[in-house]
Image (cartoon, grey):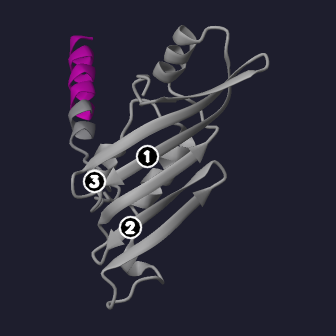
């Protein structure tokens, strides 16, 4: 009986080591690095609507040299990107780097900070419309973000402008 228990113990440990040595090769997915990483860093917000984020990523990863617009004779290219909520017009250099963008979106989900600022300052007012504007300048790497919100209280209307942190301009 003692030999049987020791034999099973050795057999159990041997199978553990046998399976521990099997190494399966893992294929990693392709990593894409954008030439426009500065643009992505500048426009990155704490909270931005999903359609806006997706279109901004499309602009950043746009491959100018593989597009039908590309020709060696031009220094800059102006490309427009559209979705139902808005559009982005981007200027690229001949290498595909973003020089500047103008972004305009209407009636998107507002960030919590912006909504909280409006509710605090205008408690009895209702948000009727909103517009989100971004102007990106490639040389400085700065993106100017602004929300323009139309408010209504009974028969009164008002337009306010805020930055992405909810500060009134």
Which of the two residues, 125 or 27, is positioned nearer the viewer here?
125
Q: Nearer the viewer, residue 107 or 162?
A: 162
Q: Which residue is mark 1?
A: 134
Q: Vertically, is 31 above or below 9? A: below
Residue that mark 2 sits on: 91
Could you say where residue 120 lies in the image, as x and y percent from the top left?
53, 9
**Identity of the residue furthest to the right in this view:** 155
Number of residues whose C-alpha sits closer than 10 Å to that of mark 3, classed few (under 14), some (14–19) or many (20 or more): few
Q: Is residue 35 visible?
A: yes
Q: Residues within 10 Å of mark 1 (few under 14, many from 20)?
A: some
The residue at 32%/63% (across/down) is: 98
Q: Which residues are magenta?
A: 1-15
The answer to whether residue 26 is visible is no
Which dot, 3 or 2, sits closer to the camera? 2
* Image spot of residue 114 (x, y percent): 49, 23
| 128 or 155: nearer the viewer | 155
In the picture shown, does residue 55 fall above or below 21?
A: below
* Residue ranking furthest to the bottom: 73
Mark 2 Cα within 10 Å, few/some/many (few <14, many 20+)?
A: many
Question: At x 26% / y 52%, what residue is drawn?
Answer: 38
Quickly name the residue at label 3. Answer: 37
Specify the quadrant that holds the N terminus.
top left
- In the structure shown, which secondary structural element does the residue marked by tag 2 occupy? strand
């Amino acid at each position: 009986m003692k030999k049987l228990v020791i034999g099973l113990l050795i057999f159990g440990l041997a199978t553990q080591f046998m399976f521990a040595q099997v190494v399966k090769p893992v294929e990693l997915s392709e990593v894409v690095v954008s030439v426009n990483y500065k643009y992505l860093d500048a426009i990155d917000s704490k909270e931005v609507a999903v359609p806006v984020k997706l279109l901004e990523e499309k602009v950043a990863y746009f491959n100018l040299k593989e597009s039908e617009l590309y020709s060696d004779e031009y220094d800059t290219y102006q490309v427009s990107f559209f979705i139902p909520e808005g559009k982005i017009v981007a200027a690229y250099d001949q290498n595909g780097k973003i020089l500047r963008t103008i972004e305009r979106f209407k009636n998107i989900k507002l960030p919590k900070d912006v909504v909280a600022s409006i509710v605090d300052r205008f408690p009895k007012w209702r948000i009727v419309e909103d517009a989100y504007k971004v102007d990106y300048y490639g040389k400085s790497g700065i993106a100017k973000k602004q929300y323009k919100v139309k408010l209504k209280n009974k028969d009164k209307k008002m337009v306010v402008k805020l930055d992405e942190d909810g500060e009134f301009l």
